[in-house]
């Protein structure tokens, strides 16, 4: 099983030298004695003879590798790397005697160059402590036999193993086990389960904890507390408009079933459907053939979106009732921005004002009245029609309206989300129709005509007046457009997070508020480790996906009242308001490091991620935005200097005043 334990298995000594050096040393007989050693002490290679039960094991048939976690009567577990597999088969609960020498391991001390003798059948620990994600992330449960409870969101294969994503009350953890022949792991999705197993560390090459996962020996240690429906599509369909509405009888955390008519389908990326006057868009890798107007059934786990809910780990299949795909309402840009048409097909007339030719998906920008919005066509379609459009053309675009809200600044006094911008998601290039070409009467043509008709003073005055009027109209359009382009100017186009400009405005506002209320602010700077290597080896497309995924994880890891901003490259800033005490920021920094360190799965490839986090607080780290940013930047580089994939919290003694300045 190559899940969490295998990371502990870097041999650090040479067998012959270690055994010779340890020949006269005292033999260690308990896991507790081994685990209490410092890495430098364990690296000496003390002789070991430990008896206990197997709680987890690693195998790799191509290399004949075998490792196991053994727990003795002290209740402490220790990992052993065997020179060859045991003569008799082992499983969770097998009683063994392990003989070997100590080694430093990559995180905690281990038994190296070991041999295991099977004694007989034992028993896995009967009493286990139910733990939270927060306790496991503290490191105190490393290698311990613990219990977790939660709802299974996903299962997938990884080499010879099976991985199960369990959503606990305070976070998601991946539990791994050796795949059992004939076992149906897919039946666990949406089941509430209790799992007993080993808390395994995720760490960096500097022996620092960056996250946790669970390893359990088999399905006997997984108890289904609430079975998942045998067919999630057989659940009573829930109206789209009722998803995440208040319901005292709701069963939180479980998957739901809804249905509607396909309004947009980007295979492998995005599916939008509507039901009556409500719409829903979900993302996923499924590529089942679908057509616009076709009925579809969708199941998934409800989660909060930008303005409207969405579904996580969604699955779909053809079904429901088909409708006329051409029955699309024509709306104004102001109505679309209002939010009532979010995730629904609409038709809008507007003037083309520009294009983003560098975007992965062809994007055009349009102006209608006082509103500016974008229309996006997925990459892969023929784009000549889009790219050859002339600025100033009046277009009719048909697609799904995607409204975004700023859930920090965009909240009114009654708690309602206020829409801040919208886009039109196009289905095909045919969704763009040119109604009017740009007028031939440009300023250049007008000047040419003025030269031709210069013989007539009346004609000259007439054309001058026309030109002036046209310039005034264009100027007014530009002024109106600038106000609507504010969102684009204040947000990162890749992640849609606030950019440096908007972050600075919010910092000034929150600093003034904190000064009046004498409250505490926190500032975190996150920098991804080895992000350039991801771009160089996997391409900038995958790098962009990683940045969007990290942005999503950071937003989920903090409160809605906090600000997550991307200030450039792979650097992010988190502004935390109304902290209870200065020490709270250290817990949040640890949570951020763990959230980033979860592997990212894209295109069947698992990409390891990690990040370094610097943190400081107001007023200890500074009383103005510039000093706070300098403080958190220095703290982040201090975290990187100490090994990366960790955090560093600045205090008044961390950086002298002259260093920050």
Image (spheres, helix red, strand yellow):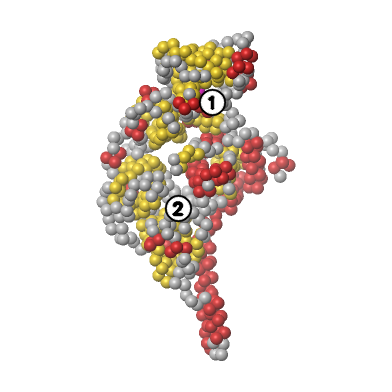
Image quadrant in which the N terminus is located:
top left
Q: Nearer the viewer, residue 203 or 179?
A: 179
> Which residue is at 46% across, 52% downward?
405
Measured from the top left, where is residue 485 in percent x and y? 52, 60
SS for dot 1: helix
Q: Is residue 142 magenta?
A: yes
Magenta-colored segment: predominant secondary structure? loop
Dot 2 lies on which element?
strand
Residues marked 1 and 2 touching at CB (< 8 Å): no
Q: Is residue 223 left or right of residue 33?
A: left
Q: Is residue 514 left or right of residue 162?
A: right
Name which quarter of the figure residue 385 lies in.
Answer: bottom left
Residue at figure coordinates x 48%, y 18% from the top left: 70
- Label 1 sits on residue: 8
Q: Is residue 326 above or below residue 21?
A: below
Asked whether residue 242 appears in the rendered view, the answer is no
- Quick one: label 1, few (<14), some, or many (20+) residues within 10 Å? many
Which residue position is annotated with label 2? 404
CA distance separating discs 1 and 2: 44 Å
Which residue is farthest right?
Answer: 658
Magenta residue span: 140-144
- Tell me which label, 1 or 2, sits earlier in the chain: 1
Q: Is residue 335 above or below residue 412?
A: below
């Amino acid at each position: 099983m190559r899940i969490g334990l295998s990371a502990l298995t870097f041999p650090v000594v040479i067998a012959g030298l270690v055994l010779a050096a340890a020949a006269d040393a005292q033999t260690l007989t308990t896991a507790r004695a081994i685990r209490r050693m410092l890495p430098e002490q364990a690296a000496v290679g003390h002789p070991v003879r430990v008896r206990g039960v197997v709680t987890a094991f690693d195998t790799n048939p191509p290399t004949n590798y075998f490792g196991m976690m053994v727990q003795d009567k002290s209740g402490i577990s220790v990992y052993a790397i065997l020179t060859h597999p045991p003569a008799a088969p082992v499983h969770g609960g097998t009683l063994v005697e392990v003989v070997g020498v100590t080694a430093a391991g990559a995180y905690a001390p281990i038994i190296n160059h070991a041999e295991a003798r099977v004694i007989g059948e034992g028993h896995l620990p009967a009493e286990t402590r139910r733990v939270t994600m927060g306790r496991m992330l503290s490191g105190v449960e490393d290698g311990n036999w613990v219990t977790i409870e939660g709802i299974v969101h996903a299962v997938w294969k990884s080499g010879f193993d099976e991985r199960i994503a369990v959503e606990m009350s305070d976070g998601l953890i991946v539990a791994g086990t050796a795949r059992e022949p004939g076992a149906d792991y897919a039946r666990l999705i949406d089941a509430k389960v209790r799992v007993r197993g080993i808390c395994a560390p995720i760490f960096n090459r500097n022996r620092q904890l960056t996250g946790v996962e669970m390893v359990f020996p088999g399905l006997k240690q997984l108890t289904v507390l609430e079975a998942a429906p045998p067919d999630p599509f057989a659940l009573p369909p829930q109206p789209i408009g009722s998803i995440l509405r208040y319901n005292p009888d709701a069963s939180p955390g479980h998957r739901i079933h809804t249905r509607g008519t396909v309004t947009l389908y980007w295979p492998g990326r995005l599916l939008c459907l509507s039901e009556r006057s409500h719409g829903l868009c979900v993302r996923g890798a499924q590529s089942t053939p679908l057509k616009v107007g076709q009925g579809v059934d969708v199941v998934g786990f409800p989660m909060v979106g930008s303005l409207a809910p969405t579904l996580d780990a969604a699955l779909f299949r053809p079904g429901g009732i088909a409708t006329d795909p051409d029955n699309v309402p024509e709306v104004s840009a102001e109505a679309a921005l209002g939010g009532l048409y979010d995730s629904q097909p609409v038709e809008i007339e507007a003037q083309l004002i520009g294009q983003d030719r560098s975007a992965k998906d062809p994007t055009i920008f349009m102006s209608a009245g006082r509103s500016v919005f974008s229309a996006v066509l997925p990459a892969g379609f023929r784009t000549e029609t889009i790219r050859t459009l002339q600025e100033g053309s009046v277009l009719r675009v048909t697609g799904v309206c995607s409204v975004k809200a700023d859930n920090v600044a965009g909240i009114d006094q009654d708690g309602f989300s206020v829409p801040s911008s919208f886009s039109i998601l196009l289905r095909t290039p045919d969704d763009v129709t040119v109604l009017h070409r740009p007028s031939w009467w440009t300023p250049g043509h007008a000047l040419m005509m003025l030269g031709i008709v210069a013989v007539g003073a009346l004609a000259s005055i007439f054309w001058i007046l026309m030109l002036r009027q046209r310039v005034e109209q264009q100027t007014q359009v530009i002024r109106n457009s600038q106000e609507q382009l504010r969102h684009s100017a204040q947000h990162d186009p890749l992640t849609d997070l606030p950019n440096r400009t908007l972050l600075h405005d919010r910092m000034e506002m929150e600093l003034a508020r904190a000064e009046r209320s004498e409250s505490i602010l926190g500032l975190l700077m996150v920098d991804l480790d080895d992000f350039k290597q991801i771009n160089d080896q996997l391409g900038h497309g995958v790098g962009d996906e990683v940045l969007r995924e990290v942005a999503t994880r950071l937003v989920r890891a903090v409160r809605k009242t906090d600000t997550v901003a991307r200030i450039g490259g792979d650097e992010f800033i988190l502004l935390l308001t109304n902290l209870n005490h200065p020490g709270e920021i250290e817990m949040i920094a640890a949570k951020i490091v763990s959230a980033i360190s979860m592997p990212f799965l894209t295109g069947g490839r698992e990409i390891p991620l990690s990040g370094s986090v610097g943190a400081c607080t107001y007023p200890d780290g500074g009383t103005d935005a510039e000093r706070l940013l300098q403080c958190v930047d220095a703290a982040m580089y201090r975290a990187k200097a100490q090994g990366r994939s960790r955090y560093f919290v600045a205090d008044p003694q961390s950086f002298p005043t002259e260093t920050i300045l």
